[in-house]
Image (cartoon, helix red, strand yellow):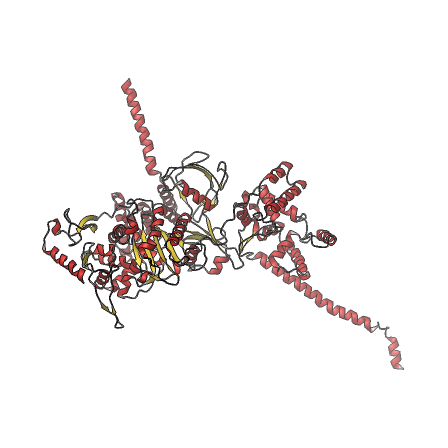
Amino acid sequence: MSKKRRRRAKPKPKPPKKRLWLKVLLMLAVPLLLASVLYVLYLDRVVQSKFEGKRWSVPSRVYARALELYPQQPLTADKLLAELKLVGYQASADGLAPGTYWRKGKQFVLTTRAFQHWDSLEPGRSILLKFDNKQLLSIDDAISIEPLSLIRLEPMLMGIIYPAHRQDRVLVRLKELPPMLTLALQAVEDRQFASHYGVNFRSIARAAWANLRAGKVVQGGSTLTQQLVKNFFLSRERSLTRKINEAIMSLLLELHYEKKDILEAYANEIYLGQDGNRAIHGFGLAAKFYFNKPPQELSIAESVLLVAILRGPTYYDPRRHPQRALARRNKLLDILWRDGLLDKQQAQTAQAASLGVTQKPNLGNGRYPAFIGLVKRQLQQDYRDEDLRSEGLRIFTTLDPVIQQVAEKALTKNIKRLEHRPGLLEGGVVISRLGSAEVSAVVGGRNPRFQGFNRALDIQRPVGSLLKPALYLTALSQPQRYTLASLIDDAPLELKQSDGSVWSPANYDHKNHGKVLLAEALIHSYNQAAVRLGLELGLAEVVESLHSLGIDKPIPPYPAVMLGSLELAPLEIAQMYQTLADDGFYTPLRAVRAVLDAKHRPLSRYSLNTEQRFAAEQAFLINDTLRMALHQGTGQSIGKHLPKSLPLAGKTGTTDDLRDSWFAGFGSDYLGVVWLGNDDNAVTGLTGASGALPVWADIMRQINVSEAPPPPMNIEYVLIDTATGLRAGSRCQQYYELAFISGTAPTEYAPCAGGSVKRSVKSFLDRLKGLFK
Amino acid sequence: MTKVFLFAIVVLLLNACAVHAPQHSHRGPVTGLMAQADQQATDGNHSQAIALLERAVRIEPRNGHAWLRLARLHFVSGDLYKAEQFARRATQFSGADKMLQRECQALLEKIRRQSNKAA
């Protein structure tokens, strides 16, 4: 009973089913709400951290050297034109717009663009240049007609070091974009941009209705914010979840940031085209990519074209589908006129304009892979590869694009002429400037655009006679003991090696020349004389000289080293000959002058450095002999055809069985090293003189223009009789005019010049003996 | 009267020579860069001065004056070894220029004294 009563006393319970539902609902709703809140907070963190942090990995941009222009410069009008084309100048009717030129015969009017070089800002200006056949005569300001003494062009953008995803962009600030570009963007893509909160429900509804009616997707309702979020934060998949994320993140982005920040991010993020495997992002780069202009210089028609393209950069590609691109641009111009953003006149002028798209710049594919390789090598001591790829660095190099072009052409042309089996012969070239030791050109193979093996830097081959100058320099560093007129023995020799075998080096012509002048031994590259002299001097001394000349790697002190068994790359040989050419001053080769960060602040400077390793006079004696080697000795096949006015000097290098063909040498302005050979080390049939020398001469003829510098003050020239090494007279049959440091030339006269007979007979007998050995 | 007239013409012509002749020899690009470098050095801006002089050396690698200025900047900044090497290079390019030779020698002497003091 009591039980019953108690039950009645209680309020009537709700049906248990209903309560359960509520409970379940509550149990589900609370965590769900909590999860949603957490999720939104998570998205908020994603949005903020990415938007606040480093938004993009920006590739580094690598610049060539900037061309200096000054009166009396040895530069022809054609060479200037070649440079202007490489930098991207366009011909025009007056040359008065930035980045354009006008040429009539030997006169140019051109307008440079302002450029922040690594060391200073060069203002843009219009200039008038007058040339004659050999040089730039004068530079005048084209507006004020004031004469100018020095002008620097903007440098060519020679390469880009990409992040792994190969997105390329040049970041721009909103204020750097022409107003019409941002106005058109909003008018076409997102009319309510200025007023919505990230998502525009009305336009989504309108788009949905249009799509429903059409039965397919014909219209998008995304705001610019949503488009940015889609590209910036989300994957490419099309799903409901992604749509929801997109909407939430758009709202969050608008909540935290101002419209102008969002628009600026959009302007840098948006995908606008493809160049091979390089993706073109942002208006800054697109302006350069399509019109070769900075964005500030875009016309109305050009600005609107970029907005037209972004709807489908492949479909509306103005280079591939100009008709489609033109039609869409003009349709957009109509819209802008209808909206009152343009007046009728402006719209009509813009519609009448051509697309204005320039030829595709050949950059993304790596125009100078071998030189970029050298740049990376120099920078790897100071920068991580990752930073080079993502920090938007500006790297100022020493590449001279005109010389690079000369070197590439010479190598390619000569290889085709010289090779026995087509397609196999390969080569490598390094060219550097005397004095500053800046590398001007690097060619890594017969196909200079090939990204692979870089023969100028990475091939390691025996260098043949290229090391001999170090040997003779070692001798001449003891002026009391050796001069160029010292007689040295070219008799055959046999050397027992550590493994018990016998090594007997032979001369290239398989003859023995008896006692020869030291100069003669170098001029004709006699092997037996070289090894004997090396042993006389001590191999350690010669190895020391090679190190002093700039060969950094360990060198085993074997006699065969003197004949070039040492394996080196063309770049290493260039460093060695640079020290010779710079009068015994070692100056490290450089490919980079400076690195700036993305905001143009200096990060590193690679400044000029020099160290005297040999007396200038001693280096001069070697260089003067190398000049004779080219004209009268091992290089004479080509050397005798070179104009006498060109002060060129150099040395051949040939290896066993004619596998490698080398030439290294210099003129008055530049140094060059050329290697030819097969990648599989097969026989090429080429000597240094028949292979590398013609390539070298072809390049050096075109780039060395200065006169020979005067010899050092204490150098005198004396005629020397070949047989005796004594002073020669007019009745002597064979003689050389050799250089001597004052006071070191022989004082005695040779018998043919009326001197004592005894010595000459001895020497004659030596020679005879040599012939029969 | 004619004499006076002729004299006036001669004076005018000579004047013209005096004004125009030096312009060619002194208005070279390297001279300008060196003057700018001197100014920067005076203002204590060494790195900018070095940059200008290196630009000069790139245009005219054998200009002893530019190398000597670089040597002086290294001397002032206390890098005696570098200063000496650059001064030697400058001497190398001084050729027959006695004045430049003397300046190089004077700097080398100063470097030697300074090094002795330090040692």
How far from the left and from the top, in percent, is residue A144?
45, 34
User: In terms of depth relative to the viewer, which is nearer, A222 or A216?
Assistant: A216
Front residue of A292/B116: it is A292
Q: Residue A531's spot in the image, x, y percent?
A: 24, 62
> Taking A478 as reference, is A304 left or right?
right
Find the residue positioned furthest to the bottom. Answer: A1
Q: Is residue A678 visible?
A: yes
Image-quadrant location for residue A355:
top right
Residue A670 in the image, given as x and y percentages of width and height: 34, 49
- The residue shown at (43%, 42%) is A81
- Choose between A492 and B60: the one closer to the eye: A492
In depth, the one of A640 and A622 nearer the eye is: A640
Relative to A69, is A556 above or below?
Answer: below
The image shows residue A501, relative to residue A480, as above or below, that is: below
Please indicate, yes or no, whether residue A172 appears anywhere in the rendered image: no
Q: In which quarter of the image is the C terminus of chain B?
A: bottom left
Would you identify the image quadrant in which residue B22 lies?
top left
At x 66%, y 63%, the residue is A39
Left or right of A43 in this view: A84: left
